[in-house]
Image (tube, rainbow, N blue to C red):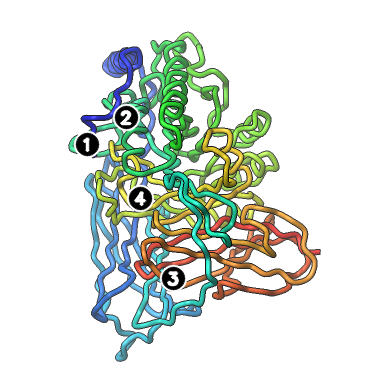
Amino acid sequence: MGLRNVVTVNSFNIDIMKTLFLLSTLALCCGLVHAEPGEHQEFEATLHAPFQSAAPQRTFNMNFDYPGLRRAQTVDWRVELIRPGGRVALRWRGQARLAGEAVTVPLPWSGRLGKASAPSGIYRVRLRASVRGEGNQQHEQVEQDWEIAVGQPAAPSLPLFAPLPRGLERGAVPAPEALPYTVYLGNLHSQTGHSDGGADIDQCKSAQPPGTAPHGPNDAFAYARARGLDVLVASEHNHMYDGSAGSAPDADPARARALYRAGLAQAAAYSKAHPGFLALYGMEWGVIGNGGHVNIFNSDELLGWETNAKGELMADTLTPRGDYAALYTLMRERGWVGQFNHPATSGQFQVNGVPLAYTPDGEEAMVLCEVMNSTAFSTNVTETETRRSSFEGACNRLLEAGYRVAFSSNQDNHCANWGAAYTNRTGVLLPDGVGLSRASFVEALKARRVFATMDKESQLVLTANGRMMGERFANGGALTLVANFASQGGKRAASMAIMEGVPGRNGTVTRLSEKAVTTFTPAPGAHFYYARVTQDDGNVLWSAPVWVMQE
């Protein structure tokens, strides 16, 4: 739908945003704002590897971008084709030049290994790319990894699974054998005109100057609801409520706090007026440079570190920039829950100088890890975006560090296409009969009853000896893991994997089994397991893990 029929922000909020914009413009022209790198000035690399191909040959497409790049940079890239079983079959290397515009590099593959056609099977295509900065040093490495089907590989055998009813299916009666939960599909990461999102599709090129775009939270909620979502989170950058990406010396802290409260009020009012849809307003805390973004879903306090020239805090509560240990402690004390947004495998979420470092408070407060996003600046409104990022490697490192996070899949929309860029969603399971509200949503996140899907019509639920994904429990004897997959869109599973790791080991997550029903006796000690399914169209689903202490 267009935006002509959606509800607009009220005049009070428009006045706030206009005032903030004027203040930030004045500060910029006078050289008063402390210049910092843009919030999304980071290297982006995505790999599109067609899952199926009618002909033996196919083309992989690499897309490289660096928003806000000030000088040309060289991208070094390497692509590996990995056989079933894990051996590298082919390698390609190359370079690309970035000079302000996104670059697409096609990589054709003949479908052959040496002189013969590649045998049938599920292969992986892995991209590693990095930017070569000053001093010819490589930095900001990105890794992407997707499966492809070659020939006619055998499909995995799956148990019968009655799909869980959707939140939009009002009054639907679950099948007698179905698990007693209802699925609510959401996009848990997006921005509006309250920070650097909310631009019209035909005007949206990247992030907007804070507080300048026309479409606020109510526009986003109405758009997402019309697109069939059950949940939308407007997660605004916490340090932009003064109307700048840096620190505006003349900013009014009362106005910054009022804008955050206005967003909370809009979300509550919209949810009340539209039963069955949950509008949530929260914040994306942190910065990318030497930091990392954390979504906080249920804080009624604006957190921040920036001050104006008078030393007045542009927030309700002081949270030192970059101090993730202190943030996790505050979140646990307040009962807030969070999500690691688009985590990198290095450099982010540091504690005592260690990236992706574990803290006990963080284990309790951080409940989700984004495993996949469509690109943040997509203007696609037909759910067909091909630029998609995978963060499974970083999420696995967080799991191995000891975090109890379930996987989520969001869109990080900065344009006015909330939930429309692709078919990916985060599925949240509520017990049957429990209404959708902020409180029930947060309880489901705390229970880690969540799956991530690139296909809004498919579901993946893992059970362990009958226990639901997200649980942690002690076990003696055999353990039976069951990956329950269902597609209401007629898709089939092309590959299945049960993944295994050890919390606190800081090691590598490995593939335990390719069977949807796997029975074995774990070694004594702590373990986690999750299921991953690739459909016959290449879309991937991730279950939440289970955490098992084997006696």
Alpha carbon separation for disc pair 3 and 4: 22 Å
Which residue is under mark 2? 219
* Residue found 33% across the figure and 23% down from its top: 211
Query: Of the residues shown, which amino acid type is indicated by label 2?
Result: Asp
Q: 148 and 397: which one is in front?
A: 148
**440 to the left or right of 257:** right
Alpha carbon separation for disc pair 2 and 3: 36 Å
Asked if the residues shown at circle 3 and circle 4 are in contact, with their CB atoms under 8 angstroms apart, the answer is: no
* Residue found 30% across the figure and 47% down from its top: 421
Secondary element type, mark 1: loop
Query: Of the residues shown, which amino acid type is indicated by label 4?
Result: Ser
The earlier-in-sequence mark between 2 and 3 is 2
The earlier-in-sequence mark between 2 and 4 is 2
Q: Quadrant of the N terminus?
A: top left
Alpha carbon separation for disc pair 3 and 1: 35 Å
Q: Is residue 543 placed above or below 86 in the rendered structure?
A: above
Which residue is under mark 1? 2
